[in-house]
Image: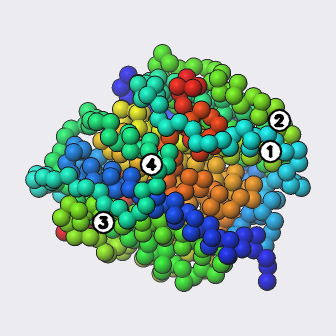
Amino acid sequence: MQLTSRQFRSLASDVDDLHNENMKTFAEETADLHLDSYRLGSGKSSRRGFIAGSAGVVGAVALGSTLLLPRGLTLSAAAAGLDDATIAGYAQGIELAAVAAYTAAAAVLSKDTLPVGELFMSHHQQHADAFGAVAGMHATTEANPKLLAALGPALAEIKDEMAALEFAFVVEGQAAYTYAAALTLLTDPAYAAATATILPIEAQHQTVLGLALGKSVEDCFPTGAFEAASLGDGTDPLAGLDPAVFG
Amino acid sequence: MSNNNISSDEIRRQLRSIDRMNEAAMPRWRDALARIFSGEERLSTDQKAAILGVPSPGRRDLFKMGGAALVGAAVLAACGSDDKKSASTTAAPTTTATAATTATTTAATTAMTDGTTATSMADEGGAMDIVLAKTAASLEKLAVDVYGTAAGLLETAAIVSAATMFAGHHQMHLDALNGVITGAGGDAVTEMNQAVFDAIVKPALDKAKTEADAVMIALSLEEAAAQTYAFAGGALSTPALRSTIMTIGGVEARHAAVLRMAALAQSPLDVFPDKRAFFPGDNPLAGIDGALITS
């Protein structure tokens, strides 16, 4: 299926308009949100930010121990053999899994944090819709079941907002790296163009979460000055999600 | 005196760490550029223009910075009189960085040596490659210079450190581009893109009076760069090049996010204007006369 960049963007724009229309209400509600506690040199605790009332990490989550394992795989041979539509369908499932994760985590988010979580969830839904529009027979309506299964235990361990945000921080980075790797495979410029407009958003998601969590500026660039473009089995927070594992 | 949440010493330590990681990753970027200039990669004019974020013939784009909007024009019409003589040798990428073996570098290198061929876009001679590379280098130099100039307005130690780090990254990008340019027999770019500076940056700098003003200028540059890379990510001829471009573009977007939240105290929601779920991918550079570096 060949799509021009213009057609793809038109599809994405239509989805964006629809979701923006639906999001007007909460946008108005959060118009006065000021989240300046993470400002460089502000003298304020970086732990506050929009994490209202946080008192540090309560109830350590096992996420760190499960994710921070030795570097995962590089681009797998299986992944290298995927066509563009298949990759789009895979990406759609990953995005839907992100939506599911944010939905599950919403219960522990404060009133200040929830709007941001909802925005990111909206983004992932729009990404899923965009990928689905060009995935052809590989389009799906379900979150990637293997990824959900892998994330399930960690999600179940989330007891508080800080843990939820730490979880999301890792997942967003893995999403960005997945797309950097996907770009090494996508042959149609239209698919690549669309992916190139999504990768920066995931990267910004991670950066926003990092700053809100009080991480250093350095820590908001987990792979340094370049996004990682490698894939892994999900246990490496510095690698994307390999379709050979989750496909 | 308020206590900085992040001490200046800690920021400086972290910046040095980032610099080391950046240096380790530069060989991949040099390799990608070398492939462009060697003629190994067959690029259309549009694709080459996209590499360095300059307009392509027939495109009409808007570039907005500091409120000023410029309508794009067919700047690369000049590319129609390309020197069709392509580079006869493959410019071996040179590197001053330690070739640290990382998963990132390994994956990108593997992808770039898999023999991926050009896409269906029309083949073009390699004549414009150096022009585009020099233009890109001049834009990187512009970013370095603007950070340097704007530094005079910065007061907060942590913001100064972050700006220094970002400027350092742009300098490394410039060095990499120049390494390939000189390797292909061209002269290194040592001057900023004057046309873009005069048309867009200078007016903003002339008005800048505060730290916030300076940060806003930096933010505009970072977002323009990120947008240029997003455009290039779909316009370059090979998957490897697209991926390489976006490993940089993603970081530019992170820069912008840091500037918004940590330096300008904006809301996380402000990082995504109009709640956008897709980063702008249109070529942000407009038809600025002289923006192409042809000599």
Q: Is residue A164 left or right of residue B235?
A: right
Mark 1–mark 4 distance (CA, rounded to whole Å): 31 Å
In primary-sequence order, the first of circles 4 and 3 is 4
Nearer the viewer's eye, disc 4 or disc 3?
4
Label 3 to label 1: alpha-carbon separation: 45 Å
User: CB atoms at circles 4 and 2 under 8 Å apart?
Assistant: no
Distance between the alpha carbons at the discs numbered 4 and 2: 34 Å
Residue A91: image quadrant is top right
Label 4 to label 3: alpha-carbon separation: 20 Å
Residue at the location (54% across, 73% down)? B164
Q: Chain of mark 3?
A: B
Relative placement, left or right, of B119 versus A122 is: left
> Does the rendering let one see residue A68?
yes
Along the polypeptide, which appears first: circle 2 or circle 1?
Answer: 2
Q: Look at the numbered disc 4 and give the secondary structure of its residue.
A: helix
- Pointer 4 indicates a residue of which chain? B
**Disc 2, disc 1: CB below 8 Å?**
yes
- Give the residue number, with chain letter if any, for mark 1: A163
Q: Which residue is mark 3?
A: B178
Local crowd at mark 1 within 10 Å, few (<14), some, or many (≥20)? many
Residue beneath disc 4: B105
Residue assigned mark 2: A157
Disc 1 residue type? Ala
